Image: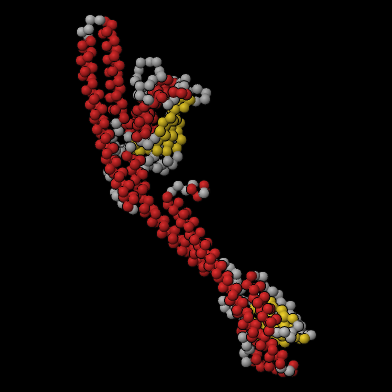
Amino acid sequence: MRFFWKYQSLVARTLLLTLLTVIVAQGISTAIWYSNSRQQEVEGIKTTTVSMASLFASTVSYFQALPVNYRHVIMEQLRKMGGTRFFVSFNHEYLNIQPIEDTRLKQVAIQSMSQALEAKLTNVRSIHVEFAHPEHLKILKNDIYLSDLPKSWAHYTLTLEPLNPPIMVVQIELESDEWIYIAALLPPPYNTLEDRILPPSQWLYLLLSTALLLIFTYFMIRRQVRPLRNLAKAANQMSIDGEQSPLPEEGADEVVTATLAFNRMQQRIRHYVMDREQLFSAISHDLKTPITRLRLRTELLESDVKRAKFNQDLDELEMMVKGALQCVHDTELHENSNLVYLNDLLKAAAETHNAHQIKVTLPNQSIAPVLGKPLALKRVMTNLIDNGVKYGNSVNITYKQTDDYVELNFIDHGPGIPEEQLESVFEPYVRLAKDKEGHGLGLGICRNILHAHGGTIQIFNERNAGLRVQVVLPFNTHRPQ
C-alpha cells in the first residue's frame, strides 16, 4: 500500500485503482469461468471417449468374429475405400508409443477410455491407451512411422493440419502375438487436450479492453482534474496577485460548487484587506494630530518631572504609530507580479555594503527567476543583508534550487541568537539589540511578505558561530528551464 499511495496525483491514483479493480474483477471472473469450463471439459471428454470406446469395441468384436484369413482382406478393402473415422491394423507385436507430456485432460481421456473398453471387451488379454504426436506415431511395426505410409492409408484420418493434435492410440491384445491397433483423433474441441486457463485470443481481448478502459479513464479524469488544478493555482496565486480575475466555473458539479465558493471567498478577502488597510492607515494617521496637541500641552506643565514623563509616554506612542504605519506600508503588495531575477536583486541589495569592502558574498551561479513582487522582495533581501552586516560583520549567501522552489541561505559571523528566542524575533516590536535604531518590525515584515509569496523564512544558529537565515520561495507558475 505504501508503494501504491506514493503516487500523489489524482490521475495516477485513479488509473492504479482502475487497473487494480480490473485485475481483481477479471481474476474472479476468470476463476469462475475456468472452474466451470474445467468441469465441462472433463464431462465432455468423458462422454466423447465413452462414445469412441463403443465404436472401438464394436470394431474389435466385428474383426474377432471374422475368420483370421479374412481379416486382412477386409482391412485392405477399407483402406482402398478411403478408410474409416479411425485407423485399424492387426500387428504381431506391441508398438512402443512415445507419449505426449502428461496433462489433466490426457489422464481423464485415458482413464475414461480404458474403463469403457474393459467394461465392453471382456474376452481380451490387455488394453493399452496412450497419446502420441503425429510425427512420432508408429504404425504396423516399431520401425514404421506414420510419415512412411501412403497418405491414403492413414494420413488424412490421423492428421489435422496445421494444428496436428495428438493422436489416441489403443492397442488391444487378443491372443499371443496378435494385437489390434486403433488410432484416432478426439473430436473438437477436445482434440488438442490443452489445459490452459485462458487462450491467447482471450488474453489479447483482456489486454485490449483494459488498455482502452485506462485510456478513456485517463482522459476523463484529466479533464475533471483540470479545474481542480486551476483552483489550486489560483489559490496559490491569490496571495501574490489579489486582483486576479474570477475562475471559470467548469467541470463536475462538485468542482463548480468549489470554484464558485472560491470566487466568493476571494472577493470577500479582497474587500476585507482593502477595508483593513484603509481603516488602519486612517487610524494611524489620525493619531498623529492628538499626539502633536498633547506634546504642545505638556510644555505648559509647570513640573519638569511630569513634563518629562508625559514626553516619554508620547515618544513611545509616536514610535508605535510610526511602526504601525511602516508595517502597513512595507507589507502592501499593490504592484504587478513579474519575473524576479534574484541575482540582480541580491546584487542591488548588497551594493552599498560592497562599495568599499566586500562584506556580502553573492552566489556565482545563475538562479532561476521567481514570480513575485519585485519591490517587496527587495525589501526582504535588503533587510536580511543589512541585519547580517550590522550584527555579523559579513554575510555569505548560498542557494539550492529544485524544480519546485529556490532556497536562499544568509549566513553571518555574529554571536547568534539564543535558541529560545529564535521564533520570538519575528514578533512585532521585539528587539534583541541594545541600540536605539529600528522598531523591531523588520523580520516580521519579511515573514509577512514571504508568506504572501507562498514562501517561508526560518532562523538557525550555526554550529561554529553565526546565524543562518533560510528563505524558501516557490516558483509558482514559473518553472526553471
Left or right: 304 in relation to 103: left
Residue 480 in picture, x, y percent from top left:
41, 41
Look at 52% across and 25% down and name the residue there. 463
Quadrant of image for the C terminus: top left
Q: Residue 248 versus residue 365: which sits nearer the camera?
A: 248
Quarter holding residue 397: top left
Left/right placement of residue 249 relative to residue 470 reads left
Residue drawn at (63%, 80%), measured in percent from left and top? 50
How many labels, in total? Answer: 0
State the scheme by which the image is colored: secondary structure
Q: From the viewer's perspective, is residue 316 above or below residue 112?
A: above
| Viewer-proximal residue among 387 and 244 | 244
Q: Is residue 328 left or right of residue 59?
A: left
Q: Is residue 340 visible?
A: no
Indicate left or right for 309 with 397 as reference: left
Residue that appears at 33% across and 37% down:
239
Residue 36 in view of the camera = yes
Residue 440 in the image, given as x and y percentages of width and height: 36, 22
* Res 454 → quadrant: top left
- Residue 114: image location, x then y, percent: 68, 78
Q: Considering only vertical position in the picture, is 165 above or below 255?
A: below
The residue lying furthest to the right in this view is 176
Q: Position of residue 45 (x, y in %)?
A: 60, 76
Name the residue rendered at 43%, 34% in the picture: 407
